[in-house]
Image: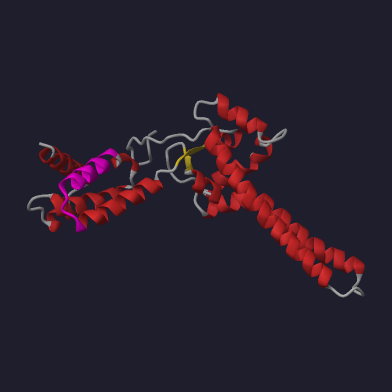
Amino acid sequence: MRGLTGVDMTLTVAGPGTRSYAFVIDWHIRLLLALAWALLGLLLRLALPRGSDAALTSTVFVLAVVAPAVLIYLLYHPVLEVVMRGRTPGKRMAGARIVTREGATPGTGALLVRNLFRLIDSLPLFYMVGLVCCLVTMQRVRIGDLAAGTVLVIDETAAAKSLSRLGALLQRSRLRPEALALVGDLLERWAELEPQRRATLARTVLARLGAGADPTDLAALDEAALHARLQGLLASGSR
């Protein structure tokens, strides 16, 4: 998959199992939220004086309790996917996220289109249409993804954060094997990281391990030069 920067990225497409796992988690969360709101409203209604206007009470109950509970259930996915930039709590726990076919974060319009077609994917029961579509399409996408131009992939964010933590560990450690492993991991995940993040990590590693590397000189290097320096450092350190 080629990103917007022209760099080839390797993204692992999430299969039906990951999709189902994320959906089950999200389904339980939104159902519990909707039921909690409805239960709270029901308790408040029971607490009202018995002499209250029955028609007014029923109208208020529908508008203040039933309608919000239904909206919580129906809008859970579109709202959270927009706010969390292609994720939901279920997707985060399942290690998945939504991206465009170029590997970028999808816009609000694409996410809303994707969720609008959820009504079709869920037919006739238990997301049967969406499941069949995932099994027969090349990138294992459902109809909503086809319409929105999106793909559900395995989330590499956790790996990038772990790499950042290793970079911080490197600044406090002089262990050679760990240093070589860090350089190797950084080079291996180079195409997956955001340009600014990988450049920052590269300069941190080179400043720590590069013999005589001057921070001012490193700041002037572009990504290609930083990548070449890392490869040279790894080659010299592996001898």
Q: Position of residue 162 (x, y in %)?
A: 34, 50
Up-down relation of residue 176 to residue 130 (above or below): below
Q: Is residue 30 left or right of residue 9?
A: right
Up-down relation of residue 138 to residue 182 (above or below): above
Q: Quadrant of the N terminus?
A: top left
Q: Position of residue 33 (x, y in %)?
A: 66, 57
The front one of 219 and 70 is 70
Q: Quadrant of the C terminus?
A: top left
Magenta stretch in the rendered image? 172-188
Is 43 covered by the magenta stretch?
no
Q: Specify the farthest residue to the top.
A: 136
Q: Is residue 164 left or right of residue 51?
A: left
The residue shown at (51%, 33%) is 15
> Is residue 148 in view from this perspective?
no
> Is residue 235 in view from this perspective?
yes
The residue shown at (31%, 40%) is 191
Up-down relation of residue 99 to residue 73 (above or below): above
Is 173 covered by the magenta stretch?
yes
